[in-house]
Image (tube, helix red, strand yellow):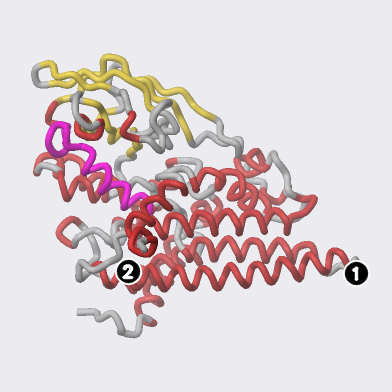
């Protein structure tokens, strides 16, 4: 059994050998922001990981997990980021834990293995036009009709709905009492009659997001996860995973720092004193960001170890979500400063055409600009920063504020 303190040099070498063999040029060149902008390379890479048995290292071993200790998982993810491996679906670590924790044996058999093996793509139906950070205000309704629910409503900001075969959604099945008490968790087949998708172009010019309209969509009662009107607890469980798994990691942000440094180098040295001063300022700021990421990684590693003893801090997910997203935006802002006049608004066209070389000789330009533009959303999605601060205060601040 691997221990937490064991030397992981051999394991790191094994991961690097796998990446060298399996990361083909087409996968490395696949255009991306924090996610790939095409499902095909995302799922192709997912299937390679699944064949190796490495697609879901954090899942329990009986459901396909690796059984690695937290430090091994960290090393694995560091090597993926360092190699510029494509990201897998951000929903893998959301709906997967929900299914193996709350799902019926039939739901686990139908959905979990295809999810693990990269055979299916999911999307998340939580946010609505009037229910974002105030998720309990959702109005999409599911009324019982025999062995089916009839679902009517609208979801918005639905990432990758145009790729997805299935949606996990929160719907209102009850009324009266607290708003949270009438919410259920449903699995909806996106091929069902009555499901309509309309694309939303985000500020980076790309199509990640969608509106989803549900009109008299019939969903079998067998697709209900957990008890009817018991979806709020499941949603909170899922959001803990989203806040720690879908907004990046310290190692992914470290790679973004490398991109900023490469952009600085591409401009070369300048005799202009103002340019030299700006370069020194950026270099200092990047060093400070690296120190912050080291601290965040150490905090996350400590909490992962404590979690095995059920002793992790209750605000861990909110702290990581808050600090990672804000640090990511800061690094992206430094990247724009490093690009200077090379910072273009139309970078998405260059990326979609696989022509980062057109970015005025700075190939790091498109990913830097995409991280900057779409990164504006990261302090909102998964629970806005204001929400995270409130959760942290409730957990640790109330005692400090007491006289």
Residue 192: in magenta span: no
270 sits to left or right of 116: right
Circle 2: element type: helix
Against 148, residue 184 (above or below) is below
Viewer-side label of 1, 2: 2
Give the mark nearest the N terminus, 1 or 2: 1
Which residues fall within the magenta stretch?
223-243
State the mark number for residue 271.
1
- For disc 2, the marked residue is 303
| Residue at the image point whose x is 67% and y is 43% from the top | 347
305 sits to left or right of 375: left
Specify few, some or many for label 2: CA neighbours under 10 Å numbering under 14, 14-19, or 20 or more.
many
Against 147, residue 185 (above or below) is below
Query: 361 or 57: nearer the eye?
Result: 57
Q: Quadrant of the N terminus?
A: bottom left
Circle 1: element type: loop
Residue 238: in magenta span: yes
Query: 270 or 47: nearer the eye?
Result: 270
Specify few, some or many for label 1: CA neighbours under 10 Å numbering under 14, 14-19, or 20 or more.
few
x, y (%) of residue 292? Answer: 53, 69
| Residue at the image point whose x is 34% and y is 45% from the top | 91
x, y (%) of residue 290? Answer: 57, 70
Is there a contact, CB below 8 Å, between mark 1 and mark 2? Answer: no
Q: Quadrant of residue 157?
A: top left
The chief SS type of the magenta part is helix
- Work out which residue is located at the far front of the displayed protein and give it: 403
- Can I make out residue 349 in this image? yes
- Can I make out residue 52 in this image? no
| Residue at the image point whose x is 13% and y is 16% from the top | 145
x, y (%) of residue 205? Answer: 61, 35
Query: 83 or 393: nearer the eye?
Result: 393
Distance from label 1 to label 2 (Cα)?
47 Å
């Amino acid at each position: 059994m691997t221990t937490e303190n064991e030397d992981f040099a051999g394991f790191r070498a094994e991961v690097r050998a796998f990446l060298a063999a399996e990361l083909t040029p087409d996968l490395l060149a696949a255009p991306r922001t924090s996610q790939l902008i095409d499902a095909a390379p995302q799922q192709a890479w997912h299937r390679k990981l699944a064949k190796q048995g490495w697609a879901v290292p954090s899942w329990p071993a009986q459901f396909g997990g690796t059984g690695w200790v937290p430090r091994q998982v960290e090393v694995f993810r560091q090597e993926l980021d360092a190699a510029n491996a494509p990201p897998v679906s951000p929903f893998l670590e959301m709906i997967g834990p929900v299914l193996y924790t709350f799902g019926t044996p039939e739901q686990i058999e139908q959905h979990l293995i295809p999810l693990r093996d990269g055979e299916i793509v999911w999307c998340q139906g939580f946010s609505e036009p009037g229910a974002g950070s105030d998720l309990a205000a959702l109005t999409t309704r599911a009324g019982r009709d025999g062995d089916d629910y009839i679902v009517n409503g609208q979801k918005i900001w639905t990432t990758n709905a145009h790729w997805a075969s299935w949606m996990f959604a929160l719907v209102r099945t009850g009324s009266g009492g607290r708003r949270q008490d009438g919410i259920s968790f449903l699995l909806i087949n996106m091929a069902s009659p009555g499901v309509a998708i309309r694309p939303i172009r985000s500020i980076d010019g790309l199509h990640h997001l969608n509106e989803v309209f549900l009109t008299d969509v019939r969903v079998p009662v067998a697709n209900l996860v957990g008890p009817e009107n018991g979806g709020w607890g499941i949603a909170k469980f899922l959001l803990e995973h989203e806040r720690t798994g879908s907004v990046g990691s310290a190692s992914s942000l470290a790679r973004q720092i490398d991109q900023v440094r490469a952009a600085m180098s591409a401009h070369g040295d300048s005799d202009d004193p103002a340019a030299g001063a700006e370069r020194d300022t950026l270099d200092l700021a990047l060093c400070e960001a690296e120190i912050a990421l080291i601290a965040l990684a150490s905090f996350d590693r400590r909490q992962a170890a404590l979690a095995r003893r059920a002793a992790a801090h209750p605000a861990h997910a909110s702290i990581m979500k808050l600090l990672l997203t804000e640090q990511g935006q800061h690094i992206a802002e430094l990247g724009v400063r490093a690009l200077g006049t090379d910072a273009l608004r139309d970078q998405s066209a260059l990326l979609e055409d696989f022509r980062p070389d057109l970015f005025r000789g700075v190939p790091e330009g498109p990913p830097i600009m995409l991280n900057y533009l779409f990164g504006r959303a990261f302090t909102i999605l998964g629970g806005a920063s204001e929400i995270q601060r409130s959760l942290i205060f409730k957990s640790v601040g109330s005692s400090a504020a007491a006289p």
